[in-house]
Amino acid sequence: MTHARFFFRQLVLLVLLASPLATSAGIIVHPSVEGRSISVTSLRNIYTQRQTLWPDRRPIVIFVLPDNHPVHEAFAKEKLGLYPYRLRQTWDRLSFSGMASTPIEVKDENEMRARVRATPGAIGYTSKDTGYEGIKTLRLE
């Protein structure tokens, strides 16, 4: 990678982290998911597929936005402490080895909300930490 591309990527990441988007990403789940908060460790374990069941033993269904979506990039960096390409590497490695399937990719935040609302055990994220009808928002602890 050239120095210019590296610098550009770092600049984009800096802009994302400094934007209001990066400070307001919300974690959403299906209303059947128990609890009002989730630990950073649990969230990271879910998205790296180390945790595949909720505490009540219900399967976790993970929804994600495309890798290059600004909300996905902000969520990965801010909430998970990972670069999006690292997440993709993890998912690809688990998928190719047959140990797990990749998360379900949706095209935009509207589809994210609709799919989480309709899928028991689902988890996803949006650009705003606000309430949506038929969806529970989790607080990060």
Image: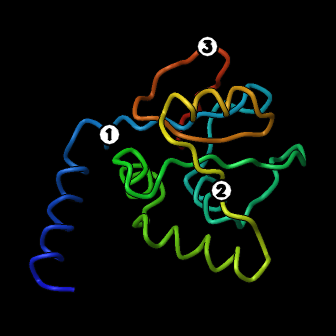
- Specify few, some or many for label 3: CA neighbours under 10 Å numbering under 14, 14-19, or 20 or more: few
Whichever of labels 2 and 1 marks the residue nearer the N terminus, that label is: 1
Of circles 3 and 2, which is in front?
Answer: 2
For the point 57% across and 35% down, the residue is: 112
Q: What residue is shown with label 2? A: 103
68 to 9, vertically: above or below? above
Whichever of labels 1 and 3 marks the residue nearer the N terminus, that label is: 1
Rounded to the nearest whole Å, what is the CA distance between mark 2 and mark 1? 24 Å
Q: Position of residue 105 (x, y in %)?
A: 59, 50
Q: Is residue 111 left or right of residue 52?
A: left
Q: Element under label 1?
A: helix
Rounded to the nearest whole Å, what is the CA distance between mark 3 and mark 2? 23 Å
Of circles 1 and 3, which is in front?
Answer: 3
- The coloring applied to the image is rainbow
Of circles 2 and 1, which is in front?
Answer: 2
Q: Is residue 8 left or right of residue 109?
A: left
Q: What residue is shown with label 3? A: 133
Viewer-proximal residue, 117 or 42? 117
Q: What residue is shown with label 1? A: 23
Q: Position of residue 5 (x, y in %)?
A: 16, 75
Q: Element under label 3?
A: loop
Q: Position of residue 34 (x, y in %)?
A: 77, 33
Q: Is residue 16 left or right of residue 88?
A: left
The amino acid on which the numbered mark 3 sits, given as a three-letter code, is: Glu
| CB contact under 8 Å: marks 1 and 3 | no
